[in-house]
Image: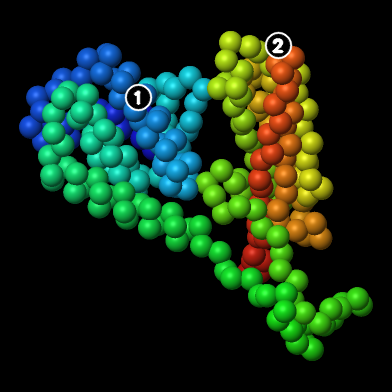
Amino acid sequence: MSTKADIINDAYDELRISGLTVSPSPSDLVNGLNRLESMMAEFFTNWNMNMGYNFESTPNINSETNVPINFKQMMVYSLAVRLIPMFNKQVPIELKQLAATSFSSSQGILAAQNLREVQPSSRMPKGSGNRRNVYWRRFMEPVSLPPNEAATNYIEEGETQSYQESFAAWLGSNTISSYTIVIDPRLTVVSSTNSDPVIDYTLSASTNSSYGPWQYVKITVTDSAGRVEIRLINFEITEVPTVPEP
């Protein structure tokens, strides 16, 4: 797993390969970190590309990116392209092509991972072989699914996972004075902590599928100035395939 420093230093190496004799100073590394964070936030929100990047309230250049290695060169080339204008230079065509190619392939991989099967219409007959319940219906019943976007969290039945929700941008100079977490029935709050300006919480997912896969987590925060912020976070609980014992 690469650190953020690895990505930034490799991006500056690409600038040297492209003809810019740049030895990054400490301020150049800070600028590189800021551009890396902004770039990954843009990919996450604007392009719906969830690579698992480690977003931090206070970015640390020595932190791991948490991004799989197959996306590393895409981050390096894309960051290098964004660093060149800082030195008042033109982006070499070869570097621009490498960045575009790696971005396109990464976007294709993530788009394939986000594909969903088309659900049958509510006007589609079930067929006699599927009417085994006491209160059966003649037609299919599509299941409500959360938005297919990078911000949606996924957890498998029976799993226990930890999450964070940052309120840093909303708080400004204020602090969190209190918070509450309300959840839908298939989720259980194992623990939660006010790590101002972040709320850390751990959830476990039930195997009871009667409530469907789409579940909400509602976090309400009151700050030191009395303001109230409500966040609704989408979760999808995925079914774990049955693996028979040998």
Q: Position of residue 157 (x, y in %)?
A: 70, 54
Asked if residue 191 can be seen in this view, the reply is no
Q: Is residue 240 visible?
A: yes
Q: Residue at x 38, y 53 (%)?
A: 107
Instruction: Name the quadrant containing residue 191.
Output: top right
The extreme bottom residue here reads: 128
Q: Which mark is residue 234?
A: none
- In the image, 91: left or right of 151? left
Q: Which residue is mark 2?
A: 225
Where is the N terminus found, in terms of image quarters? top left
The answer to whether residue 243 is above or below residue 41 is: below
| Residue position for label 1 | 33
Q: Which amino acid type is shown beneath numbered disc 2?
A: Ala
- Which quadrant holds residue 21? top left
Q: Earlier in the sequence, mark 2 or mark 1?
A: 1
Q: Is residue 93 left or right of residue 186?
A: left
Q: Residue at x 76, y 32 (%)?
A: 181
Judge by depth and name the residue closer to the eye, 244 or 178: 178
Give the tally of numbered discs: 2
Q: Secondary structure at mark 1?
A: helix
Name the spot of residue 175 as percent of width and height, x first. 65, 13
Tag 1: amino acid = Leu
Q: Residues within 10 Å of mark 2 (few under 14, many from 20)?
A: few
* Number of other residues with Cα within 10 Å of mark 1, as a class: few under 14, some 14 to 19, many 20 or more: many
Mark 2–mark 1 CB contact (< 8 Å): no
Would residue 140 appear left or right of 196 to someone viewing this image? right
User: Which quarter of the rendering shows the C terminus?
Assistant: bottom right
Is 135 placed above or below 86 here?
below
Front tag of 2 and 1: 2
Percent position of residue 44, x then y: 46, 41
The residue located at (52%, 46%) in the rendering is 150
Q: Going by the picture, which residue comes out furthest to the right?
A: 134
